[in-house]
Image (cartoon, helix red, strand yellow):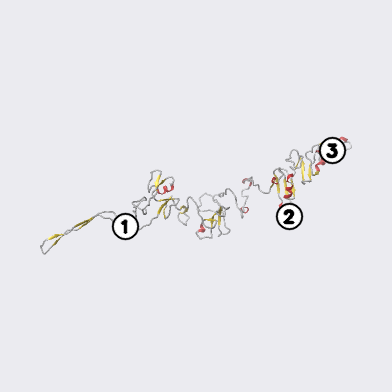
Amino acid sequence: MALTDSNTYTEPTAGTSLNASRTQYNNSMRSLLTNFRSSSPPDTVNIVASGSPIDVPDGTLFASTETNALYISDSISKKSSPVGGNFTRNGIGHRNENGIVAMMANADNYEIGELATTVSSGALAGNARLYLVTANNRTAADFIDVGIPPTNGSIVNTMIAINGITTDRVNLTGGKVTTAGLRVNDLATGGGKTWYPEAGAVGNAQLQISGVSSTANSAILFNYSSSASNVSLAHEPGQTAVARTGLAVIKQDGTYTAMAANIVLSSAIQGSGTVPVPLLPAGSIVVTGGAVPAGWLECDGQTISRTTYAALFAAIGTAYGAGDGSSTFLVPNFGSKVLIGESSDFAMGPGAATFVSGGTITTASGSASLTTGTTTASTGGKDAGSVTVLNAASVGGHTHTAVVPHAVARYMVKT
């Protein structure tokens, strides 16, 4: 038996004085109080020394019939004392409750730092869990399931081993990933699948998406929460041979939709592996039968900024007009003109002249002359007289006018 006032027990003998024997007996009785079991914890009325109540000594054990838990009196280490006095479960271990309902019924008797298991037999056996009490509010919110990762952002990368999560444990079937950003890191140089053309000493970053079969479509869906305005970037291997080689942008109704980009590139030689170049570079000139759309300028000789239209200026320079010579330049002016191809006889530039109203052309005015030889002619018989014949003639200048068959449209240049 462990004594409350001594760590040594001496059994009374015939030579022991009455006073020493009484003290030894009292100490033994106090030790028995460590096995106190009741609905209420021991108090000063339960322990009397020298005729007066004394405080419950540290180390006294109390088994509560209300909570079915064991407590120890510890005035120094207690966190809180929901059952009263200095009794605490700090350092004793965990409680076992007959299911979550029973644990919540006793929530007001738990103190911070306690562990509780909900282990039951029968139908509830599969619901065994381990809970930690994190506050002294005496409510269900104080309990956290130790087996479930916290949702307060306290789990960081350093808690997860490198390569600790394998692909067979990442399954998003029927769900979605909600995140402010998804980053795919590049692999080591030369690692992973290759892409063409592959730059030397550059690793490949990949986000791999596959259909359920080699002929099934695969897509990245944008604006998932909307059923009326979402769009997909899709690969459709079941389409025509040309469509199978690329990507399509598809609306929620299955029709194709527009894609915006600063510059659209295409292989320099279609169908080859040549380096992509702008599909419609600045300086391209086309004809339209309608209004000039945004991104184009009508070829009407207007003056524009070299800074604002830097790409167009880099393409055509001052071939069609230098503007103010420093900050502006002119777009081509094809009004009332036809185009001819550049050659050694014709340099890139504004050309000369224009059609007049009606599409007519007129030849230049000039003069014409007629020159004849001279001779004589007899007017009668032998040795008769002679006459002079016409040997020169001239006519005044004149012009010719012709109508050139034509139709009219707008020329426009890409900016």
Badge 1, how many Cα within 10 Å: few under 14, some, many 20+?
A: few
Badge 2, how many Cα within 10 Å: few under 14, some, many 20+?
A: few
Ranked by sequence position, the earlier of labels 2 and 3 is 3
User: What is the CA distance from the residue labelled 2 to the residue labelled 3?
Assistant: 50 Å
Residue tagged 3: 26
User: What is the CA distance from the residue labelled 3 to the residue labelled 1?
Assistant: 142 Å
Single out the mark in the foreground, 1 or 2: 1
Ranked by sequence position, the earlier of labels 1 and 2 is 2
Residue tagged 2: 123
271 to the left or right of 337 = right
Q: Nearer the viewer, residue 344 or 221?
A: 221
User: What is the CA distance from the residue labelled 1 to the residue labelled 2?
Assistant: 105 Å
Q: Which amino acid, by three-letter code, is at mark 2?
A: Ala
Determine the residue located farthest toward the bottom in the rendered image: 381
Ranked by sequence position, the earlier of labels 3 and 1 is 3
Badge 3, how many Cα within 10 Å: few under 14, some, many 20+?
A: some
Single out the mark in the foreground, 2 or 3: 2
Residue 359 position within the rendered picture, expressed as x and y whole percent measured from the top left: 34, 55
Residue 260 position within the rendered picture, expressed as x and y whole percent measured from the top left: 50, 52
Disc number for residue 402: 1
